[in-house]
Image (cartoon, rainbow, N blue to C red):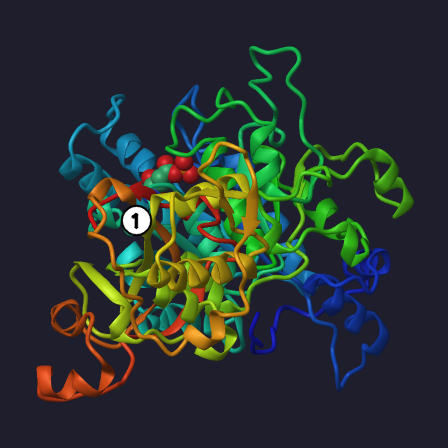
Amino acid sequence: MSSRPPIHGAATTASLVSATLGRESSSSNKAQHDAAASTSTASAANPPRGKRIVIKLGTSSILSSLTNQPKLSVLSSIVETCAALRKDGHSVVIVCSGAIGMGRLRMGLNEKPKSVGERQALAALGQVRLIALWDSLFAQVGISVAQVLLTRNDLGDRPRFENAKTTLSTLLSLPFSSIPIINENDTVSVSELRFGDNDTLSAIAAGIVDADYLFLCTDVDGLYTGNPNSNPNARRLGVVRNVALARKAVSVDTPGSNFGTGGMQTKLIAAELATAAGVATVILNGNQPTNILSVVARGLPALDADQRLPNSDQGMVSSISSLLDAEELSKVGYPPILDPPHTLFLPTSEPLAQRKWSLLHALHPAGTLVIDEGAFARISKPESGGRLLPAGVVGVEGTWERMQAVRIVLRRHRIASSAEATGTNVERDALHHSQAIQESMSAAALARRGLTTFIKSSDGSGATTPIHLAGEDQHAHLAEPVLTRDAPSELDWELIEVGRGLANYSSIESERIKGIKSSQISTVLGYADSSYIVDQLALMPTEGAPSAHRSATKGRG
Ligand SMILES: N[C@@H](CCC(=O)OP(=O)(O)O)C(=O)O
């Protein structure tokens, strides 16, 4: 992730920081690097850097489902926990739900709001109470809080994303050194522009502030394979190294709360987003917030790089367990059963750079550019520089202005998807020369993702021949492979999201320049601000992954 401004918390003490640092090694993860730097070089000139910690509090952590009243003792404990973290040099951001619940409490309503208007009105009535409560509690320990309300739209383009980042960084730095308290701006969020749950919002906030830890506080002790209240065989996951694989071990029957909108599914999505940004993510019980201190003090297991999973392996690794087992943990001096109880998701060993992570996960895409296979082959090459020419664009969907984020969706033969699914065979009756060009481009793109494309004989013998990739470069100059057979029917195509980027042209302009050469842009539009239709393009770590953003649908050609 990118560099950050220095953190100025309260005066640091040796206690928790040194306990944390002492456990960590020179493993590849960001937190460990930071910690190692702190232990070895701490001096007045180079003060130890505390952790940046995001704490997400669900409605169930704030309000009692029995009395509907604020859990004052829990809230006070959160305040004491945050004060202790800051005293030890860490900085804290809170993402707090509960505006609608507080609004219901204020207005004496037992029922959940039915209409959007009611929800928005209750959020407006409740948010003021919520922040007033926090303000008065934190004032007791001399800490200033700052209210930050965000919508998806506020993170819709790079300038607004950077604004949010600057505001949060400034709030955490001197002379402010405050605790930002973030919530979704429910009063103006409409359904398609909502985060919907604060788990996702907290993961995005953790990525924005370049956090070391994200704590997802909920009403159970961690992530269980089933509902521990009804299933005696449900067990809590300990240290998870791959969220996508862990998801498979978890039943949909995991508990959520009555008050909130999230559940374990949204926590898994949040963990996936945050760990991809290099943020260790912890699910624990919000009724014992002081447990956060112990988890931060213990630090992360000191693993070698090969014991961790890189981001690009999400969903594709079967040989390594998604969980660290007791033996692996004891080897690195880590308890096999986590006490206090929680589930720890390790950050990926190769966190995405923040620019790429924000494009893939944080910026809200305003629309879609559909590209052909030739264009996909070109943008898959490092030398493409993350830029897309208009020539390879075959479709424009949605409405956007310049510099807004857009999805890049590959339109490819449905047949090619079987290559991805099986990793081996493509059935094909015959290949015309021009089709072979297109196949080789597609095969090359798949090969760069570790997949091989084969031609399977149609004589029933089952013989397969790998597509030879040597010719790929000699065809790379072709702007658009030419098909000699009839255009495929719409059933022959499938659409799959392969990345995201920032649009250099609005959707209206993009519609006019799609499929043309860059040299023709000024003729068509009367001006040409860029030869590329998209800049700063980020491809998904593996094709179409992560699953939360996967969009594989059959569509029109
Ligand atoms: N923004 C909403 C929170 C949405 C919500 O319920 O989230 P959560 O309790 O975390 O599942 C509110 O403040 O009421």
Q: Quadrant of residue 168?
A: bottom left
**Which residue occupies the foreground of this view, 287 or 105?**
287
Disc 1 secondary structure class? helix
**Residue pictured at 75% horizontal, 82% vertical:** 46
| Residue 498 position (above or below residue 34) | above
Mark 1 lies within 8 Å of ligand 1 (Cβ measured): no
Q: Quadrant of the N terminus?
A: bottom right
Find residue 195 and report its horizontal and vertical position in percent: 33, 47
Which quadrant of the view contains residue 74?
top right
In this rendered view, identify the residue nearer to me: 520 or 159.
520
Give the labeled residue for mark 1: 128
The number of callouts visible is 1
Amino acid tagged 1: Val
- Identified at 44% across, 19% down, the residue is 66
Q: Nearer the viewer, residue 43 or 25?
A: 25
| Above or below, 378 relative to 16 | below
169 vs 13, left or right, is left
Is 387 placed left or right of 279 in the picture? left
* Picture layout, residue 401 above or below residue 340: below
Image point (49%, 35%), residue name: 61
Residue 235 visible, this orientation: yes
Task: Give the crowd class for mark 1: few <14, some 14-19, many >=20 residues within 10 Å.
Answer: some
Which corner quadrant of the figure contains ligand 1? top left
Q: Quadrant of residue 535?
A: bottom left
Q: Where's residue 122, x and y in %?
A: 23, 38
Asked whether 122 or 331 is in front, the reply is: 331
- x, y percent for residue 171: 47, 70
- Is residue 142 something that shows in the picture? no
